Image (cartoon, helix red, strand yellow):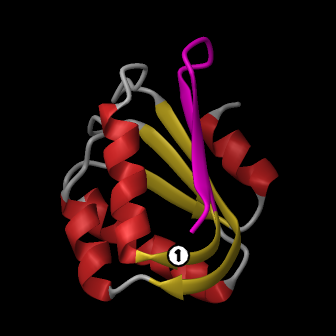
Amino acid sequence: MPGSYEIDPQRRLVTSRIWGAVTDSEILEHNRTLRTDPKFDPTYQQLVDMTAITSIGVSTSMINETSLDQFFEPGTRRAFIATDDAVFGMARMFALRAEGLGQTIQVFRDSRQAREGLGI
């Protein structure tokens, strides 16, 4: 899974992009790299673009595990963009599980709506 992120301190925004084939280990690596980045602030909003994912090799147990391992502050707004039905469903499963820990994650099919949801 190629993936990247950008931290914009002025906008208080983390923008993550994930594309190609996605696996458990790549999700773990993305999260590890982001959470240990010295510029990362857990109160920043997050926009996750998953519109270019071509294959999902992420297990249900990984979704459960990562939804319980939150490193954004509870209540911080996050928006995921997923146009593919399977990716959208995976993102919704993650969001629903994470909501139990106070996370605020919305999943959108459209970039414009996701940005509006974050107020950007």
Q: Position of residue 94 (x, y in %)?
A: 37, 70
**Residue 75, quarter of picture:** top left
**Residue 38, quarter of picture:** top left
Picture quarter with the N terminus: bottom right
Which segment did they paint magenta? 1-18
Three-letter amino acid code of the residue under disc 1: Val
From this viewpoint, is residue 95 visible? no
Q: Position of residue 79 (x, y in %)?
A: 56, 51
Which residue is found at the position 77% from the left and 54% from the top?
Answer: 111
Query: Above or below — where is 62 with respect to 100?
Result: below
Which residue is found at the position 61% from the left and 86% from the top?
Answer: 55
Q: Position of residue 72 (x, y in %)?
A: 32, 39
Residue 44 magenta: no
The one nearer the camera, 2 or 53, is 2
From this viewpoint, is residue 84 visible? yes
- Please name the residue that numbered disc 1 is placed on: 22
Which residue is found at the position 32% from the left and 75% from the top?
Answer: 63
Q: Left or right: 23 with respect to 12?
A: left
Q: Position of residue 5 (x, y in %)?
A: 57, 41
Residue 8 magenta: yes
Q: Residues within 10 Å of mark 1 (few under 14, many from 20)?
A: some
